[in-house]
Image (spheres, helix red, strand yellow):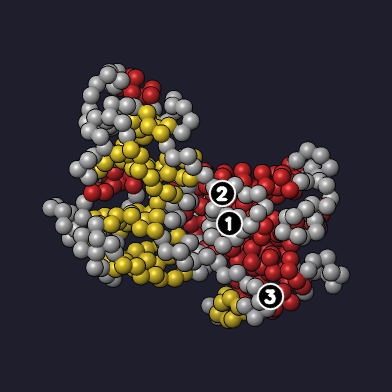
Amino acid sequence: MPYQITTLATLQARLADKWEGVPFWTAEEARLAINEGLRWWNLLVGAWKQRVVIASGANQVWYNTPATLLYPLKIDWDSAPMVQSTFGDLDLGRPKWEGETTGTTGAPNVPTLWVPGGFTLVAIWPADASGTGSFGIDGVTPAPVLVAPTSFIDLGEEEISVLLGFALHIAAFKLGGERFAATMPYYTAFLRHAALKNARLLKVKAFRELLGRHRKEDSVPGPPEAVPTS
Amino acid sequence: MSTTDQILLNELQYAALETPNNGASWPSGLWTVAELSGYLTQRQRRILYETGCVCNRATLTTTPNVFRQPLPADWIQTRRATWQNPSGVFTPLLRSNVWYLDYGLVSWESIDSPVPLVYMDDIVPTLQIQVAPAGLDGGVIQILYVANGAALANTGVLLTIPDDLVPILKWGVLADMFAKLGRGHDPDKAAYAETRFQLGIELVKSFLFGTPEGGGVA
């Protein structure tokens, strides 16, 4: 994918190309619409990611998700991958798990499982008894917020185009009526492109309904739709 | 979280064709500052409740042989509860309800047990949790719960939800604004905004709890 650095000024100019020269929208509205588009894109596909390393605490089970992450995707212990689990699995399968450490007889000697508690908490089993190790957390970061004209994002051109269409759709909401309805294809194109990047979206019923795909068969990604030539 | 209620209110003013002034006033007269504050607060609490995206932990000191214990004042939903005895041993409490106990453990209200088996909140008064059987060993209840969001009154208060979820809140508030009966009533806009809000809720829930077809993280 041909990444490029695109500035807010460029995005605003390209968005302004999509609407009439009469100033019905301000540059600030364009900026807000673009930033909202970035946040929805990040929610849909987890576009921006980061790795954060945190030190372990002795016998500590619960950790706060690093503030720079929106939610964790993967955690490793001293570069050894840990397996993601759930509270249900641990509570039912190993009821005493919360009190166990790497020094507990019968427990693994390294942290092995991790469980997210919402976006903001993570529990580890077994807890590190020594407190001298580290966890590497790969997760999705919040979407960038473009403020200055020179603020930039790194997205491929194919994503910039659907993003701008979606931003136009957001900005057009205040118009209402037919003019807003005319921007709905930009919205569905944005969602469809997100589904190409993240096939799990097709498992979300509300998402499928927005694309007009109501059948269970539609939850499986199929071949790309044919593009009309006329 | 770095977005304040005023930042979001400013954005809402653009979407509602109002003069943007960080929500200080709504010159059209279609909405009031208090109404918008109410919409913001209620929708934020709905996001927190329906998704459980922001969880907190609390330790509840218990009274031996007492079924019902008080919950934190900001509690809105329990996600998980465990019993920790004075020796530090944890025992998960499964979620149940009084019907199961009445028919599955008929003597639950009179038997003694050092450690409770289940917790429930279906028949208790507000802000109380009930464990059964009542614990005797003086242990504590550790809960993972969803706390109430900050009251948003157009005073520059930080939102409780992560910044990336702010668009979900925005569309929820727009749905409330245009659903208001009166001169500002626009059912088409309200319905559309509500679908955007629901999509956001379902997306967050799919991250945390998976989909009917599987997946999820919590």
**Which label is found at residue A222?**
none
First-in-chain label (2 vs 1): 2
| Residue at the spot of label 3 | A11
| Residue at the spot of label 2 | B150
The residue under the point 51% across, 52% down is B204
As shown in the figure, which amino acid type bears the numbered disc 1? Leu
| Residue at the spot of label 1 | B158
Q: Quadrant of residue A36?
A: bottom right
Q: Is residue B20 left or right of residue B141?
A: right
> Is the Cβ of the residue at disc 3 closer than 8 Å to that at disc 1?
no
Q: Dot 3, crowdedness within 10 Å: few (<14), some or many (≥20)?
A: many
Question: Where residue B17 sits in the image (x, y, percent)?
Answer: 80, 56
Name the front one of labels 2 and 3: 2
As shown in the figure, which amino acid type bears the numbered disc 2? Ala
The residue under the point 66% across, 44% down is B38
Q: Which chain carries label 1?
A: B
> Is the Cβ of the residue at disc 2 closer than 8 Å to that at disc 1?
yes
Question: Where residue B80 sits in the image (x, y, percent)?
Answer: 37, 42
Q: Quadrant of residue A64?
A: bottom left
The one nearer the camera, A39 or A202, is A39
The residue under the point 39% across, 47% down is B57
Q: Dot 2, crowdedness within 10 Å: few (<14), some or many (≥20)?
A: some
> What's the distance in space between the residues labelled 2 and 3, CA to CA?
34 Å
Question: Where residue A227 sits in the image (x, y, percent)?
Answer: 66, 66
Label 1 SS: loop
The residue under the point 16% across, 53% down is A104
Q: In which quarter of the image is residue B19?
A: bottom right
